[in-house]
Image (cartoon, grey):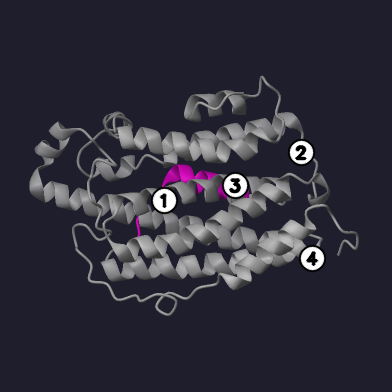
Amino acid sequence: MRPTALPGDERLMKLFRNATEEQWVPGQTFEWNVEWDYANPLRMASLEYEISDGAFWSKVGDKGRESLSRDFQVWRLSQMLHAELAALDVCAKLTQLHTDVPAKLCCTLQAADEARHVQVFTRLLDEIGSAPFPITPSLGTLIDQVGRDNRISFLSLGMQILIEGVGIGAFRRISIATDSAFVRTLFSYIMKDEARHFALGRLIVSEPERLNDEVGPAELDDFLDEALALLDEYLRPTEVLARFGCSADQAKQLIDGSSFGKQFRRTVFGQIGRPVLELDLDPRAKTRQRLEALAGLAS
């Protein structure tokens, strides 16, 4: 263990205290007693959050609309489950790698949060009555790249900032689009956990003394640029539309045509882009250019 105190220790201990005070249990902290609508389990008020092309919805008809609505929702819940399982593994690794007590404590409680989230999404899919979709290739590739690394900087950036940051955006998106009080309540608790995790990762990567590695600028730029490209691809559920006969290009065009979806991606990449830009990357870095394209963030 590192005996000397670090500048961010007090903020880490505040995060730890908040995490202990904000633990929650589904079914106890709030009631879990839901009747699920088969075609619209999360009670999304509109499908325009995914696709705003009226001609497309007319073409698929009422039956196709119900099937597609369900598949979109099950797909998103499935990817959330896969991400939470990966976060649980990464937090266990970070707990071992950190050599200071405050960071270890925070990562341990994050692992407890992730275990609860795994339980929540497993239960949601079970009650909705659907087997999870397989992990989408882009998310699977990023999780594999992050999970294989043993450097705190890459683990924290990849999971606590990038993947968790996208998760916060997805949870918020569902909370806005649902008309279910239960879904809003459930996701508000999850988002509060994820906001702490995001803050933890941001604090850790801002203190070089807390890291166990030296990552060169070029390697960091390559990692972040590829990670952002994978996350951009992940946010498009093209494999759902493939079940309805759409090619990859057609699916991408339909999804990208949604104004809600465009704003969602800009908001998500704006959020995760700010701590990335705090890393003081070279002005010519590929990561800066990609963030400018994805979120309009000034380099």
Q: Does residue 131 appear in the picture of this structure?
A: no
The residue to which callout 3 is attached is 161
Q: Are marks 3 and 2 in contact (CB under 8 Å)?
A: no
In this view, the mark in front (1 or 4): 1
Q: Label 2 vs label 4: CA separation?
A: 23 Å
Q: Are marks 1 and 4 in contact (CB under 8 Å)?
A: no
Q: Are marks 1 and 2 in contact (CB under 8 Å)?
A: no
Q: Amino acid at mark 1?
A: Arg
Task: Assess disc 2: are there few (<14), some (14-19) or many (≥20) residues with their C-alpha within 10 Å of its C-alpha.
Answer: few
Q: Is residue 295 left or right of residue 122?
A: right
The N terminus is located in which quarter?
bottom right
In this view, the mark in front (3 or 1): 1
Q: Secondary structure at mark 2?
A: loop
Of marks 2 and 4, which one's residue comes earlier in the chain? 4
Q: Secondary structure at mark 1?
A: helix
The residue to which callout 1 is attached is 172
Q: Secondary structure at mark 4?
A: helix
Of marks 1 and 2, which one's residue comes earlier in the chain? 1
Q: Are marks 4 and 3 in contact (CB under 8 Å)?
A: no
The residue to which callout 2 is attached is 215
Q: Amino acid at mark 2?
A: Val
The residue to which callout 4 is attached is 101
Q: Which residue does the image show at 39% across and 34% down from the upper left? A: 263
Q: Which residues are magenta?
A: 131-147
Task: Assess disc 1: are there few (<14), some (14-19) or many (≥20) residues with their C-alpha within 10 Å of its C-alpha.
Answer: some
Q: Label 1 vs label 2: CA separation?
A: 33 Å
